Image (cartoon, helix red, strand yellow):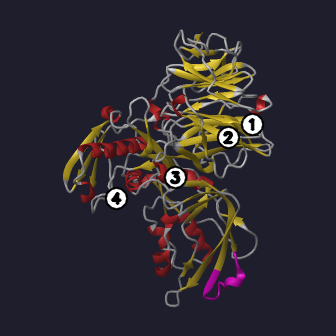
Amino acid sequence: MGADREGGRWRTPVRGTAYAVCGVVLLAGCASMPDSGDLRGVESTPRQETQVRVFALPPRDDAPPAEIVQGFLEALTSDDPGYATARQYLTPSASQLWKPERSTTVLADGPATQADRPGGREDGDDFTFRLTGSRVATIDAQQSYTPASGDYDQTVHLTRDKKSGHWRIDSLPEGVVMGKSDFQRNYMSLNKYYFASHTTSARSGQPMAVADPVYVRERVDPTTQMVNSLLNGPTRWLRPVVRSSFPTGTALSKGVTALAPDDQNKLTVPLNDKAARIGHGKCEEMAAQLLFTLQSLNPTVDEVEIRAGGNPVCSLVEERAGTVAERGAEDRPDYLYFIDARHRLVRMTNAGDSASSEPVPGTLGDGTKPLRSVAVARDEHSAAGVALDGKTLYVTSTVAGNSLGDPVLQSKGKTEADRLTTPSWDGQGDLWVADRDPADPRLLLLEKGAGEPLEVLTPGLDGRINTVRVAADGVRIALVVDRNGKQSLLIGRIERDTSGERPTVAVQELRSATPDLEQVTAMSWAGENRLVVVGREAGGVEQVQYVQSDGSIPETGTLPGLTEVTSIAASEDSEAPLFATSKEGLLWLPGGSGWRTLKETGSVAFYPG
């Protein structure tokens, strides 16, 4: 379930709000459940076409406890906006206490159920079932995805009403639980947008827009869900490094329950009085946040108008959004770069079977200094190269006639594997690199690619850094970390304190983006919230796939396989084609086909950044 607008929605958005009777599927609760005996899985609902909405049936008056639990679990997977049908399986007091929006637990399969005889008898007035399964992920109250593992084991207690004789659930786990296939059918990943607190674009000086991924229910008015989520503020993990231009307390106007763009692809967003007295510049920033957010759901939305207190405040069209804030996905690279057989920096002028290449002007392209790895700045005016032995790092211009100069960094590692990693440029123009010297392993930052390196604090890092890739927004960093022979992809939050003479920079709350992979050999950012990764599961074969920065995997995440991949090249602008290097040389991936060899040689391929 992809969240990157530039790459296209992984799921086709539902634009209609009215559904014919034949387009509504009722869940009949017909699957059998045991009153006793072995564990049995609740079969996940088969995937439906996205234009079909699925609703559950209410409980029958004479339904036994097993059918009540079954019907309730199936109702959780329906498209009922407020879970009204699911609540009919609960007692009034349980319905009042139950808060389905607080969490969603995703299991590998639908929850298995087992009657727990000690909890009651069907010929009595109470009964208990256990719900069990293997955790895959959790969605919290902020709609943020977190991979999970371990066993799920919760109880559901039922009671029989003394007057009506109807069985109802009076005690149940918090939130919602469902199998992975039902989760994929019901939810989709989208990005909402905020602004980086301490970084601005090196190119324009504008605020950098930062994607904050959330999961919303796909057929329950996702437009209104996303606007409300944006107004509620960033998710907990991202909050320390971003800001919102919406004043505290801003919400949709009272009585507004649904939003939809008009036939001109314009969305009008009525807000409460908190937004009534803001300046024009701040209002345009709010409109940019809304526009970027809505376009992750529906790319055809090209204008947002904000109203407050019943009056128009400002509007913003897509063509002007780039003058308000900058997005990494809008940086179209001019070239693909790679290192050729002579260890020179080479660039490719166009993609495809007829692509031509040329050495990059200047000392990195003339072969004077053999190179192991290079990073080209996002403006493509300068580059940082690591010498073939991995010991020294140089920063120089990519124009003819430049001089290499002295190295800006040197490693004291005794072997090539214990020296400098491939460097990476962020959108602010700063250069990042890790020194793998076992005696002094460090993550380093060179402001604007020069000066005394700043050691980046990495609390919670367990292992040694193999690879560094900084997102264009400058607030997220992807690290491949080696711990006891296992290479994992971790995403960290970059926090900067600029109050002192020199800034203090730290990478906080590292989290896994590839919990199922045992070895990650190459990776690259491939969108504002997406990466392309080469790795393998335990006992598996090497595979190329997309992953989200929160650890979730798009439905169409797997790509054609490769073997012995040494690098993978993707761009935040996902219209740029994928490239890779392997024992076969430099390869590229045309849309809808397999990998093709472009050059017989090429050790490392990459886009700017």
Question: Mark 4 against mark 1, which lies toward the viewer?
Answer: 1
Q: Residue at x 22, y 54 (%)?
A: 276
Mark 4 or mark 2, earlier in chain: 4
Q: Which residue in the structure is indicated by mark 4?
A: 248
Q: Hey, what amino acid is under mark 4?
A: Thr
Mark number for residue 4?
none
Q: Hey, what amino acid is under mark 2?
A: Arg
Mark 3 or mark 4, earlier in chain: 3
Mark number for residue 442?
2
Q: Residue at x 45, y 44 (%)?
A: 198
Q: Can residue 555 be seen in this view?
A: no
- Alpha-carbon span between mark 3 and mark 2: 40 Å
Instruction: Reply yes or no: does residue 268 show up in magenta.
Output: no
Question: Mark 3 against mark 1, which lies toward the viewer?
Answer: 1
Quarter the N terminus occupies: top right
Mark 3 or mark 2, earlier in chain: 3
Circle 2: element type: strand
Q: Residue at x 55, y 45 (%)?
A: 505
Q: Which residue in the structure is indicated by mark 3?
A: 187
Instruction: Reply yes or no: does residue 120 show up in magenta.
Output: yes
Foreground pick, 242 / 251: 242
Mark 3 or mark 1, earlier in chain: 3
Is the C-beta separation of discs 1 and 2 under 8 Å?
yes
User: Could you tell me residue 53's position as x and y percent?
Assistant: 46, 54
Foreground pick, 159 / 435: 435
Region of the chain picked out in magenta, as a range: 115-127
- Alpha-carbon span between mark 1 and mark 2: 8 Å
